[in-house]
Amino acid sequence: MRWLSIFIALTTVSAAQASPFPTDDDLQRFIAEKAVLTRLDQVRERITDTTSELVVTAMGFLGVPYRRGGNSAESGFDCSGFVKAIYEQTVGLVLPRLAKEQAAATQAIDRKDLKPGDLVFFNTMRRAFSHVGIYVGDGKFIHSPKPGAEVRVEDMGVNYWSRRFDGARRVIGGQQQAALVPAEDRAP
């Protein structure tokens, strides 16, 4: 038994000295040299800033009237025109024009994974993805609802919206290159 203990101790010591894996010091040095943590914080901050800016920009259009086919504050918005305008102005990505096309061009996510800036879709015309809005957090979304109404915030938990919820999507610019075109690359 004593020999077994000595063998384990020697094996552990020699393995630690000859380990091909970096030690804690090597890892700390690598992180410091590459500024990995700083870069991660910058990316997180940029994403948070963009999401906040997107929601704040959308809130700036509260009260703009609904207009079928509308895609500007001057003429009014329909639901997909509103979402398209907000993403183009804030993020610089041009989403497709129709709600069903926006759904097809974005990544499906679970409702429990919703974050501010994600898109929420509803079946309001007896067809999938017939209405779209932007999730603002706390179970609420902003949208341009219908003729005679204005851009407003609504609670997704209300019976009308919860019964018609069709899914959530996330806009990820790098993954939908064919569907999402950076504003600077689109034709005039």
Image (cartoon, helix red, strand yellow):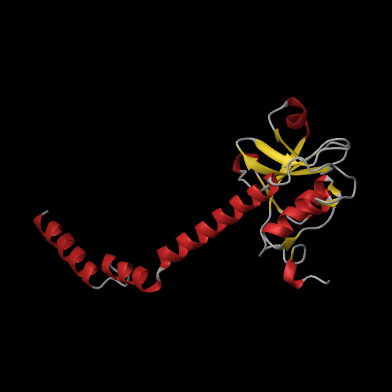
In the rendering, at what x and y percent does residue 50 appear?
A: 60, 56
Is 185 on the left or on the right of 10, as rendered?
right
Q: Residue furthest left?
A: 2
Residue shown at 73% from the left, 41% from the top: 62
Q: Is residue 48 above or below residue 162?
A: below
Q: Residue at x 48, y 62 (%)?
A: 42
Q: Position of residue 121 (x, y in %)?
A: 76, 42
Quarter-of-image position of residue 97: bottom right
Relative side of 92 to 49, left or right: right
Quadrant that contains the C terminus? bottom right
Q: Position of residue 92 (x, y in %)?
A: 70, 63
Res 87 visible: yes
In this rendering, the answer to whether 46 lies above or below 59 is below
Q: Quadrant of residue 130?
A: top right
Q: Residue at x 15, y 65 (%)?
A: 10
* Number of numbered discs overlaid on the protein picture: 0
Q: Position of residue 166 (x, y in %)?
A: 76, 39
> Above or below — where is 14 with respect to 107?
below
Question: Is 44 left or right of 103, judged from the image as shown?
Answer: left
Asked if residue 117 can be seen in this view, the reply is no
